[in-house]
Image (spheres, rainbow, N blue to C red):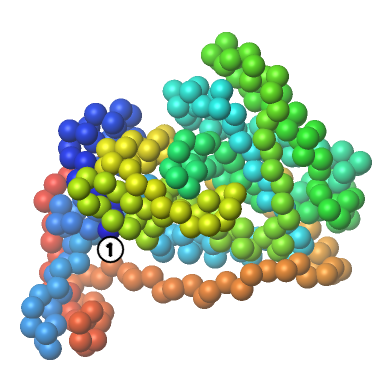
Amino acid sequence: MLEVADILRAAGPEVCARLAALPSQKRALQAILQCRTAELGGQVWGCEQCGPLHYSYHSCGNRHCPKCHGQQTEQWLEEQRPRLLPCAYYLLTFTLPAGLRALARSHQKLVYGLLLKAAAQSLQKLCADPRWLGAQPSLIGVLHTWTRALLYHPHAHFLVSAGGLSADGKHWQAAKNPTFLVPVRALSVIFRSKVRDGLKAVGLQHHVPATVWGQKWVVHAQHAGSGRKVLDYLGRYVFRIAISNSRLESLEGGQVTFRYRDNRTQQIKHLQLTAEEFVRRWLQHVLPTGFAKVRHYGLDSSACADRHAAALALLQANPGPTPPSATSAPPRPASSLCQPGGSWRCPHCGREVVCLWNLLPSRKIPP
């Protein structure tokens, strides 16, 4: 299977070094190029039936690597699924306008954090209004910075309960209107104001074109059923970014071809880029070191654990109609890292193989 690492090698070290301007980007490139190679070490396994030795190399563990974190993704989902309240959910998407993207590139941690914070505050402000909900909902926010064609497009997805817990903690309040949670137009205006105020507080409002504050900002809302299907979608990119190896189709003559689904037509399309352009687009989505791309607010925050438990008890005591939910596939067992004396099955004959010895890394693991 073609991998992102193959494209990085095809682009060459000079191109990668020129395009990777930030320390976080340099670390991501180094880690992915070394992932599951002898440079990171591993184990040697022996099979009595096949004869030849089998080499198993360590993963890099970088959060941008498309080959790593299958186990962590499933673990994260297993932790989040029980926290979904037994009620309907909405998916709301908040997008930064094009006029703010240059500032987002140059001040990633600040602007990305402000995007998530402003979106959550806007939602909670309208949900607290008794005209719409008059209660505290559960919110999970996840930052994405890409389109399916790998273009730079910072936006935040929020999975929000279609109801909330009353201020006194004694009642579950369902959404007043069965067709929407809060008015999206009002939400976009509040969101725009909170982003503007946040930039003003740190002295960056003058770096934004004045026309940005007069245009309409895009906030999209749609019903999400029980929330499980959306949670599974968001989980795919909690520990990776932009594109998976399975979408890469070919690398020929320095040209990369990958497939994506068009948002408007929902048809599968193919895009061909030079290896250099692919690397440039991919690097745009490497996050700053230490930035938390998943945030929990309202009833889902750790500070509201008692109120979340109260909401869960109220909903279980008075169950409403069960919202539609996609059937989830059972989790796949994750392979563990074996020490000498451990065992697993030979990929060729199926017989048990034994770990004979460890291979030390040939180079220092990326910091």
Foreground of the two, 231 or 154: 154
Q: Which residue is drawn at 55% across and 24% down?
A: 100
Q: Which residue is drawn at 80% across and 33% down?
A: 186
Residue 300 visible in the current orientation: no
Q: Crowding near pointer 1: few (<14 within 10 Å), some, many (20+)?
A: few
Q: Which residue is drawn at 87% across and 38% down?
A: 129
In the displayed image of the protein, which residue is found farthest to the left? 51
Position of residue 271 measured from the top left corner of the image (x, y, whole percent): 39, 48
Foreground of the two, 155 or 214: 214
- Work out which quarter of the rendered image holds the N terminus and state it: bottom left
Q: Describe residue 184's horizontal placement relative to residue 52 as left or right.
A: right
Residue 205 visible in the current orientation: yes
Position of residue 356 measured from the top left corner of the image (x, y, whole percent): 13, 74
Three-letter amino acid code at disc 1? Met
Position of residue 31 measured from the top left corner of the image (x, y, whole percent): 26, 46
Position of residue 101 measured from the top left corner of the image (x, y, whole percent): 51, 27
Quadrant assignment, res 309 = bottom right
Q: Describe residue 130's horizontal placement relative to residue 40 as left or right.
A: right
Q: Describe residue 134's horizontal placement relative to residue 199 as left or right.
A: right
Q: Residue at x 63, y 20 (%)?
A: 212
Does residue 350 lie above or below 276 as drawn? below
Quadrant assignment, res 16 = top left
Does residue 347 lie above or below 258 as drawn? below
Residue matched to label 1: 1
Which type of secondary structure does the marked residue at label 1 adopt? loop
- Work out which quarter of the rendered image holds the C terminus and state it: top left
